[in-house]
Image (cartoon, rainbow, N blue to C red):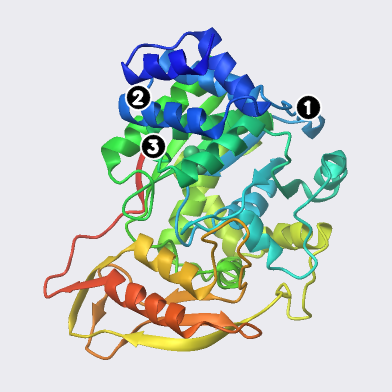
């Protein structure tokens, strides 16, 4: 068997055998296949797709390229969540404490941000002292004391995906349903959960640009889950505008703290409570027999009555994070305003393009263009106007921030301001109301 023949087969849209896919994944993992051959096969997959059988084999081989976690120490059904990536997506820091309050124990292995989507690990790492590099041997102890643990992905979790993803990122081969589905599901299967809720983001700020693509990706991941013996529910959420108000590491964690005080933006609260409700429905918590709407109502109460905050404090303190006497976490840096942008005309906001806002926050230093880039934790954007809001010329639409301790490059600030300003579109007519939860597939 050789890679040249495998690439040629996929180039002519022939179905690869299980042995050929296993040969490819093993060769990628042990470094025997050169990047140029891997990249050529990835591009052939992007162009010619994969059958369900090929996609499932690819996923299983990628999951088995490393260790499969055993979560039996949780003592309950293990339910995980994952997002396909968004702008302003701070759902995980809210969902973990929320579901912990129902007795659901979660081991959440998260990634860092690359490009315009933020990473959960970076957000938690913006808290002074918080340890995101937890040794897997310490997971059971943290689960026992706090009910949850959040950690960066260990190198032995689906290592084939790590290698493939970094190549895809630089060869323009990320946007492919079989490659995205196998990448996500291999990590989730290796993570050891019995049931998985996937937040499939959809819109200009997401990989899936429209609802049909989002449904197709959901169908692919549900079918992989079925064959791998995992229950999967996909919640399709809109990424036509950023979620909530704040984008950037500390800014997003500050917004999380606001939500836990009962002051959440409606779209963020809706996304968080819907995702949490589906996790609870899949769990063995006693509330699983209630309807989704009933569970969401309990979640909403727990976000505002201090219950979720209590569990959030446990998570932060339990992993070494420092908390101020006011109750707020202490951050590594704080946002300092550098520029406020205003509306150029009267009208209604019709778009706040999430990808442009995400790219603007990367220019400010909140995200990375390359893996080695240093983050400015305090950098980011706070948006004041969302789709459907009425504005008058001169009203503030958003503020750009840098970290207090950071130095900002003037050219990058100018680029960020241009992107953020152009992200907003206006009309004299009020646009249709935008829903954050677009569909649920299972
Ligand atoms: N998230 C992943 O983990 N993998 C992809 O391919 C895309 C989004």
Q: Residue 368 in the image: x percent, y percent? A: 55, 62
Q: Earlier in the sequence, mark 2 or mark 1?
A: 2
User: Where's the N terminus, which quadrant?
Assistant: top right
Q: Nearer the viewer, residue 198 or 188?
A: 188
Do callouts 3 and 2 mark residues in contact (Cβ within 8 Å)?
Answer: no
Q: Residue 178 in the image: x percent, y percent? A: 42, 28
Q: With respect to residue 356, does 37 lie above or below?
A: above
Label 2 residue SS = loop
Q: Please indicate whether residue 85 sits to the left or right of residue 256 in the image.
A: left
Q: With respect to residue 82, does 267 lie above or below?
A: below
Whether residue 290 is visible here, answered yes or no, is: no
Q: With respect to residue 31, does 203 lie above or below?
A: below
Pointer 1 local density, CA inside 10 Å: few below 14, some 14–19, many at least 20:
few
Do callouts 1 and 3 mark residues in contact (Cβ within 8 Å)?
Answer: no
Q: Nearer the viewer, residue 81 or 358?
A: 358
Q: CA distance from mark 3 to mark 2?
A: 25 Å
Q: Earlier in the sequence, mark 3 or mark 2?
A: 2
Which residue does the image show at 34% across and 20% down from the upper left?
11
Pointer 3 local density, CA inside 10 Å: few below 14, some 14–19, many at least 20:
some
Q: CA distance from mark 1 to mark 3?
A: 28 Å
Q: Nearer the viewer, mark 2 or mark 1?
A: 2
**Which residue is label 3 attached to?**
440
Give the residue at the far left of this rendering: 428
Q: Nearer the viewer, residue 242 or 285?
A: 242
**Which residue is label 2 attached to?**
49
Q: CA distance from mark 2 to mark 1?
A: 36 Å
């Amino acid at each position: 068997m050789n890679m040249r023949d495998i690439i040629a087969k996929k180039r002519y849209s022939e179905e690869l055998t299980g042995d050929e896919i296993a040969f490819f994944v093993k060769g990628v993992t042990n470094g025997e296949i050169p990047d140029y051959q891997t990249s050529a096969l990835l591009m052939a997959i992007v162009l010619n797709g994969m059958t369900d059988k090929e996609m499932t084999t690819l996923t299983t081989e990628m999951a088995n390229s490393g260790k499969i976690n055993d979560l039996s120490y949780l003592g309950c059904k293990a339910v995980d969540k994952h997002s396909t990536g968004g702008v302003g997506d701070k759902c995980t820091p809210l969902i973990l404490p929320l579901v912990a309050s129902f007795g659901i124990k979660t081991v959440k292995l998260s990634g860092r941000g690359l490009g315009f989507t933020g990473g959960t690990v970076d957000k938690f790492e913006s808290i002074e002292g918080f340890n995101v590099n937890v040794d897997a041997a310490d997971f059971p102890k943290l689960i026992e004391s706090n009910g949850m643990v959040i950690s960066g992905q260990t190198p032995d979790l689906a290592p084939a995906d790590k290698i493939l993803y970094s190549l895809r990122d630089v060869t323009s081969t990320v946007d492919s349903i079989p490659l995205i589905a196998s990448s996500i599901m291999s990590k989730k299967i290796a993570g050891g959960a019995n049931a998985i809720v996937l937040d499939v983001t959809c819109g200009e700020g997401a990989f899936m640009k429209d609802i049909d693509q989002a449904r197709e990706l959901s169908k692919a991941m549900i079918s992989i889950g079925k064959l791998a013996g995992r229950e999967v529910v996909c919640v399709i959420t809109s990424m036509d505008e950023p979620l909530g108000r704040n984008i950037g590491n500390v800014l997003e964690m500050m917004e999380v703290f606001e939500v836990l005080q009962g002051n959440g933006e409606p779209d963020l609260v809706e996304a968080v409570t819907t995702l949490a409700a589906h996790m609870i429905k899949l769990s063995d918590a006693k509330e699983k027999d209630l309807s989704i709407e009933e569970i969401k109502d309990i979640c909403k109460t727990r976000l505002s009555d201090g219950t979720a905050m209590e569990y959030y404090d446990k998570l932060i303190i339990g992993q070494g994070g420092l908390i101020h006497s006011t109750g707020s976490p202490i951050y590594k840096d704080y946002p300092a305003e550098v520029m406020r942008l205003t509306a150029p005309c009267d009208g209604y906001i019709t778009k706040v393009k999430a990808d442009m806002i995400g790219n603007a926050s990367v220019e400010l230093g909140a995200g990375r263009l390359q893996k080695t880039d240093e983050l400015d934790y305090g950098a980011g954007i706070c948006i004041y106007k969302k789709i459907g809001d009425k504005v008058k010329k001169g009203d503030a639409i958003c503020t750009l921030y840098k970290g207090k301790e950071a130095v900002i490059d003037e050219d990058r600030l100018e680029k960020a301001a241009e992107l953020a300003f152009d992200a907003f579109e206006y009309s004299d007519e009020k646009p249709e109301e935008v829903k954050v939860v677009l569909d649920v597939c299972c």
